[in-house]
Image: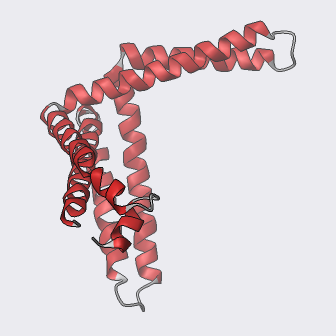
Amino acid sequence: MNQRVITILSHDTDPIQTWRAWPWILALGAVLLALGFITLSMVTLATALSMVLIGMIILLAGAVQMFYALRYRHWKGSGQQTFSAVLYLLVGLMMIFKPFAASIVFTMIFALVLTLLGCLRLSMGWLARPLQGSWWWTLSGGLTLLLGVLILINLPEAAVWVIGLFIGIELVMAGSLWLLVALQMKRMV
């Protein structure tokens, strides 16, 4: 068994204990992969559900803030705390009851971030051009910029599927990674 690989994968010094975990890691990979393909088969629903879930979290945060703002209203700043809680509650409710409107905002911010990251990576590629392999910066920047611009020019239609698509891709990538780790662990015996 390759002790170095075991040490990288686990804090456990007993290689047999670490090796015994491979079926569970395989199961984790399979579940994530299956969830990823399910998500990819219904990206619109995944987008809506993710907005509703985030809305519920924001709504809960607003309720907790409101509780404390009212409970300790004699403290300085309780008015600002109450206003903050109301904003949280309104945004949470909007996300729950208007998930596609929320997805437009999220997708627009995401596309703007991608566009900015693409520009930054392109500039890093330009600055690093004397170095070998600097073209990776330029390629990465160009593709990221292109993705951001493509999403932006396809708003609001893209907002219905972009978030669900990216969640699905992430789940497939994570599932594939854990499957490969599990298979590598199994081979170590």
Q: Residue furthest left?
A: 41
Q: Quadrant of the N terminus?
A: bottom left
Q: Is residue 79 above or below residue 28?
A: above
Locate residue 114 relative to residue 57 in the image: left or right. Answer: left
How many discs mark residues in the rendered view? Answer: 0
Q: Quadrant of the C terminus?
A: bottom left
Residue at x-position 16% and y-position 38%: 34
Q: Is residue 145 above or below residue 157?
A: below
Locate residue 102 relative to residue 80 in the image: left or right. Answer: left
Quarter of the figure with residue 141? bottom left
Nearer the observer, 116 or 44: 44
x, y (%) of residue 83?
68, 16
Residue at x-position 26% and y-position 42%: 28
Mark yes or no: residue 175 visible: yes
Locate residue 62 relative to residue 156 in the image: left or right. Answer: right
Locate residue 136 relative to residue 80 in the image: left or right. Answer: left
